[in-house]
Image (tube, rainbow, N blue to C red):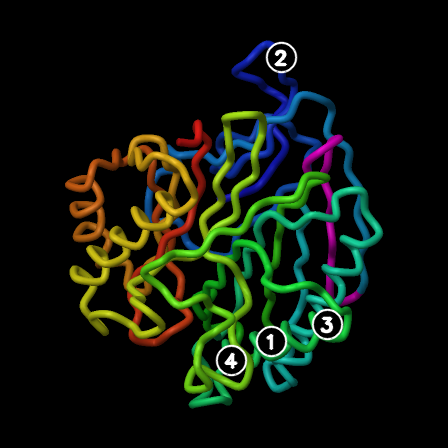
Amino acid sequence: MLICIDPASTSPDTNAELLLADIRLRRQPDAAVWSLPLPLLTDPACQERWVVADQIQTSSVSATSWQLQHRYNQHLACTWLRFEVPTNGDYGERMRWAYTEMLGHLRNSNHQQLLKIWHYLPEINTGAGDAEHYRHFCLGREQALTQLAVPRPMPAATAIGIPAHPEQQTSGSVAAVFYWLSSTLAPMNVENPRQTSAWEYPIQYGPASPNFSRASRLDLDARNSLLLLSGTASVTGHATAYPDDCAAQTDEMLLNLHSLVTAAGMPYHPEKLCLRIYLRRPADWPLVLGKMQAAGFRRQQLQALHGDICRRDLLVELDGFTRQARL
């Protein structure tokens, strides 16, 4: 999967799109390609298209161990940060640095309203108890938010682990990727009534709670909204439901999806959602696909990716977006 600028438009009043697609669909050779670090398990039939009405501008900055690229128009921006994480270093400190870099960039841009953040994290489940990398990521994020006095809660977010590769064992570092959508317009954050708000998780989940909203809604006009969904899995309250049972977790995940879209004040139309499905075990995709299709989703709406979920007993997670009229 890739992120690139696509100048080909399906509508006469637009001239650029920001989309996720397979490299075979890339139509602007001079646009730098941003590769998602997760193996794609499906054909890239469903593309995320961020359509804008004016010309895309670009900027970038890089150093030895990181690169940041920024693409934007008048009201919307997408920014990409790729950085190295030492395999024997302080994982949380590196995540604190990355969040500080991201928030500093936002404060110096014209698009200061965060809409959604995607985090793709190497070795997310490495370490036991509070030494686990995901918990260190949450701690580093919390330290950066506190240091910069950022208001809580944060907007929608996803955190998925990058599957390990053998060469990582000897390279001395692994790459992490953050990317985020931001705007000149502020979103409304949405919580799921079936789930405890992430920032209110009890201490058993680590020294710093995750900090994100279950979804963020951006109102585009008097009736139409863009809803950006956080990573949504088989969690009821704050506990994992049906540990290590992919079939039951998929059913619970779909219940949470329905609840979340409804809580955002939007009608639940499966055919209008575009979703990524993250799978810890690629072999589970036929089972998950069957359940998604039975729930009203078409295969073309779904992209399956091989990625590790933030809790070891979770096997499947989704995120995505929908653009439609509010209720």
The quarter of the image holding the C terminus is top left
Check if residue 83 falls in the magenta segment. Answer: no
Tag 1 residue:
171
Closer mark to the observer between disc 4 and disc 1: 4
Task: For mark 2, give the secondary structure.
Answer: loop
Rendered location of residue 239, percent (x, y): 31, 74
The numbered mark at residue 127 is none
Mark 2 vs mark 1, CA separation in Å:
47 Å
Give the label, 2 or 1, closer to the camera: 2
Q: Earlier in the sequence, mark 3 or mark 2?
A: 2
User: Secondary structure of the magenta portion, mostly?
Assistant: strand
Identified by mark 1, the residue type is Ser
Which of these two is toward me, 185 or 86?
185
Horizontal relation, residue 188 to residue 31: left or right: left
Please report the bounds of the magenta region as a residue range: 64-76
Give the amino acid type for the residue marked by disc 3 in the picture: Trp
Vertical relation: 57 (above or below) 60: above
For marks 2 and 1, the one nearer the N-term is: 2
Image position of 239 (left or right of 231):
left
- Which of marks 3 and 4 precedes in the sequence? 3
Amino acid at pointer 2: Asp
**Residue at horizontal 22%, vertical 62%?**
249
Mark on residue 97? 3
Q: Residue at x 81, y 54 (%)?
A: 107
Q: Earlier in the sequence, mark 4 or mark 1?
A: 4
Residue 182 to residue 165: above or below: above
Q: State if disc 4 and disc 2 touch (CB < 8 Å).
A: no
Picture disc at residue 135: 4
